Image (tube, helix red, strand yellow):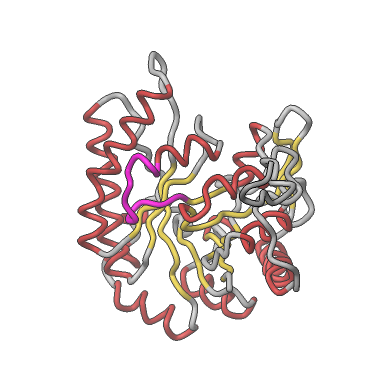
């Protein structure tokens, strides 16, 4: 059974105890920290670094899980010194996650810089991730790479995770990012399959060119949230659906209490909805043709 959580970006004014208390009251199973109040660099939050046992206790008392630590780090730079600094940041957050009992650390896939090309950038990202695998394994933490930037689609993310080829590196899938290139969940989710370690959910309205017009409460945009959950059921996904909000909270979204309450209700209803297990290709016009008849040996 899938679990539900939300990102701390959805409630930037709340402190840790308020986040956990509201998560429990609203019926969420877990929380992803992508910053705390005004600080996005988690290793710089004294509450997390100086008192990890207290943080563990806050979550344990409420039966809410700390699902993931998100960091604004990327590994796509063609400058070795920049990549080394970013890897140091990732390493510090992996160590923090281990102290807090958090299973996942998430980073963004990044952008292609000027005078660079996509394949070279992908190769460097994969090399950097491979070098971080021993660190992740040592601390018992899984690295998640989220699509976005110049790599919003599922195919490039699949190749990146496959190039690393280790279960300590998986993907965080965000369909809202894929919508910027017109990619629907009927392509994305079957493509990535078991490589998905976490799903980020948000909703927005897009025009026919893939331009994001405005963010919407969950279920009110055209990111096909219900369809995503149906397809995730079809691949027997049983991990977290994490509602997230943009870093700069748009005026189109209601107050955190309202938007999170609606998100919890929407997600629970969709998860609990009884349905047949779907093929990941059902309803996809690009689905491969199925065999129309059985060939009996000795016949033509």
Farthest residue to the top: give it.
115
Farthest residue to the front: give it.
298
Along the line of sight, which residue is nearer the eye, 234 or 85? 234
The residue under the point 40% across, 58% down is 69
Residue 13 percent across, percent down from the top left: 55, 60
Residue 146 percent across, percent down from the top left: 47, 46
Residue 136 percent across, percent down from the top left: 26, 56
* Quadrant where the image shows the N terminus: bottom right
Along the line of sight, which residue is nearer the eye, 256 or 203? 203
Q: Is 122 on the left-hand or right-hand side of 134?
A: right
Q: How many marks?
A: 0
Residue 222 colored in magenta in the image: no
Along the line of sight, which residue is nearer the eye, 292 or 1? 292
| Rendered view: 190 above or below 160 | below
Q: Is 292 on the left-hand or right-hand side of 199?
A: right
Residue 10 is drawn in which quadrant? bottom right
Residue 165 colored in magenta in the image: yes
| Rendered view: 141 above or below 52 | above
The residue under the point 22% across, 36% down is 84
Range shown magenta = 161-171
The residue under the point 69% across, 46% down is 291
């Amino acid at each position: 059974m899938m679990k539900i959580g939300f990102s701390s970006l959805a409630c930037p004014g709340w402190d840790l105890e308020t986040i956990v208390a509201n998560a429990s009251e609203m019926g969420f199973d877990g929380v992803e920290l992508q910053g705390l109040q005004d600080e996005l660099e988690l290793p710089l939050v004294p509450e997390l670094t100086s008192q990890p046992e207290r943080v563990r206790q806050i979550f344990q008392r409420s039966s809410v899980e700390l699902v993931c630590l998100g960091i604004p780090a990327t590994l796509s730079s063609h400058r070795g010194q920049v990549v080394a600094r970013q890897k140091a940041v990732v390493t510090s957050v992996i160590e923090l996650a281990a102290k807090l009992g958090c299973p996942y650390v998430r980073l963004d896939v990044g952008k292609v810089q000027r005078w660079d090309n996509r394949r070279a950038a992908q190769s460097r990202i994969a090399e950097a991730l491979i070098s971080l695998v021993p660190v992740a394994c040592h601390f018992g933490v899984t690295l998640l790479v989220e699509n976005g930037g110049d790599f919003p689609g599922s195919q490039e993310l699949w190749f990146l995770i496959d190039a690393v080829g280790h279960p300590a590196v998986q993907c965080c899938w965000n369909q809202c990012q894929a919508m910027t290139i017109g990619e629907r969940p009927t392509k994305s989710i079957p493509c990535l399959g078991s490589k998905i370690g976490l799903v980020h959910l948000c909703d927005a309205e897009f025009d026919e060119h893939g331009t994001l017009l405005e963010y919407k409460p969950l279920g009110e945009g055209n990111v096909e949230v219900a369809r995503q959950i149906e397809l995730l059921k079809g691949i027997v996904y049983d991990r977290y659906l994490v509602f997230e909000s943009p870093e700069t909270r748009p005026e189109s979204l209601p107050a955190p209490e309202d938007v999170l309450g609606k998100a919890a209700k929407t997600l629970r209803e969709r998860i609990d909805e009884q349905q047949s297990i779907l093929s990941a290709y059902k309803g996809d016009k690009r689905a491969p043709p199925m065999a129309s008849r059985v060939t009996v040996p000795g016949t033509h």
